[in-house]
Image (cartoon, rainbow, N blue to C red):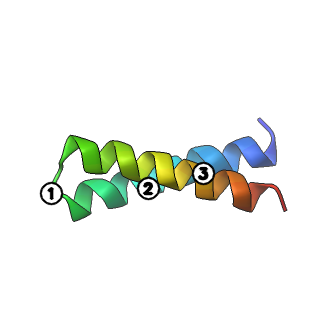
Amino acid sequence: MSHRQKSTVGGAALGGVAGAVITNGGILGTVGGAAIGGVIGDQVGKH
């Protein structure tokens, strides 16, 4: 796995956990958090 891929996966994992916590385990919050976290991780991994 490249550095960028690792950053994307890590961001998605952290975003999913954060979304689940914020929405008390709501599926949409978890999936939304993972998606947003993945995008952020991807952008961070570019540098």
- Residue type at mark 3: give it: Val
Q: Which residue is the site of mark 1?
A: 24
The label nearer to you, 3 versus 2, is 3
* Residue 19, percent from left and from top: 32, 57
- Residue type at mark 1: give it: Asn
* Residue 21, percent from left and from top: 24, 61
Q: CA distance from mark 1 to mark 2?
A: 14 Å
Any mark on residue 15, and which?
2
- Residue type at mark 2: give it: Gly
x 81%, y 40%: residue: 2
* Residue 45, percent from left and from top: 76, 56
Q: Which residue is the site of mark 3?
A: 39
Q: CA distance from mark 3 to mark 2?
A: 10 Å
x 31%, y 47%: residue: 30
* Callout 3–callout 2 Cβ contact below 8 Å: no
Query: Residue 1 sits in which quadrant?
Result: top right
Mark 2: secondary structure: helix
Q: CA distance from mark 3 to mark 1?
A: 22 Å
Which numbered disc, 3 or 1, marks the residue that appears first in the sequence? 1
Please tell me which residue lies in front, 40 or 13. Answer: 40
Which numbered disc, 1 or 2, marks the residue that appears first in the sequence? 2
Mark 1: secondary structure: loop
Mark 2: few, some, or many residues within 10 Å (few <14, many ≥20)?
many
* Callout 3–callout 1 Cβ contact below 8 Å: no
Q: Is residue 42 left or right of residue 19?
A: right
